[in-house]
Amino acid sequence: MGTFSNLQPGTAELDAKNQQWRAALAKANDGSKADTAYKNQVRAELEAMLTLQAQNCAEIANGDLVLYLRTGYEAKNTQGSPTPMLGAVTGLELFYGDSDGELKAMWNPIEDAQNFTVHAYSDISNPEGTLIKEYLIKKIGKQKIILSGLPSGQKIFVRVRANGGSTGHSPWSDPAEKRVP
């Protein structure tokens, strides 16, 4: 379990900056434009320090939400809703396109998908390192979509994953392979 005893910036620093901001705020109420500008500067510094400390607390908590909430900072869900992940795309098939450098792809529909990411790559053992082209395809039914701009004559592999917005994305489909016309 993490400890919050060595926070950066420290609590004493934040308290001092908060007192500085409160004094500047009081002076700016009946003060000059320079007093207001100084108050705004101190407020920005205080906000930056609070953000740094909240980030430091998050690092110390290391994913332990209960521990993080004990700091008094609020937590925001940045990973989406806790709905189940989408299932993998199945039934991926590749067909020759109507032009050179073009293939058509088809797969089984996924109801909760908003769109699909399609990767065309050259080495089955290294999809990320040999990525030729990435496509973002709108939600489809049982229809063929066109993958254009591929290298003619080269054997390529294609994989697909569904994207569901707040539900995240599915794992990659099993790859399909075809030589590009």
Image: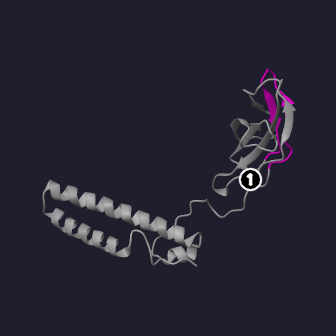
> Above or below — where is 152 with respect to 110?
above
> Above or below — where is 124 with respect to 36?
above
The way the protein has been coloured in the rendering is one colour
Residue extending farthest top = 99
Which residue corresponds to mark 1?
A: 170
Residue 175 at x, y percent in the picture: 83, 43
Quadrant including the C terminus: top right
Is residue 68 at all visible to an observer of this figure? yes
The quarter of the picture where residue 129 lies is: top right
Residue 107 at x, y percent in the picture: 82, 42
Disc 1 is placed on an element classified as loop
The quarter of the picture where residue 26 lies is: bottom left
- Please report the residue visible at 45 percent of the width from the left and 78 percent of the height from the top: 5
Quadrant including the N terminus: bottom right
Mark count: 1
- Please report the residue visible at 49 percent of the width from the left and 70 percent of the height from the top: 57
In terms of depth relative to the viewer, which is nearer, 72 or 164? 72
Residue extending farthest front = 6
Q: Is residue 103 magenta?
A: yes
State which region is magenta: 89-109
Q: Mark 1 is on which residue type?
A: Ser
In terms of depth relative to the viewer, which is nearer, 171 or 63? 63
> Above or below — where is 115 with respect to 26?
above
Q: Is residue 79 magenta?
A: no
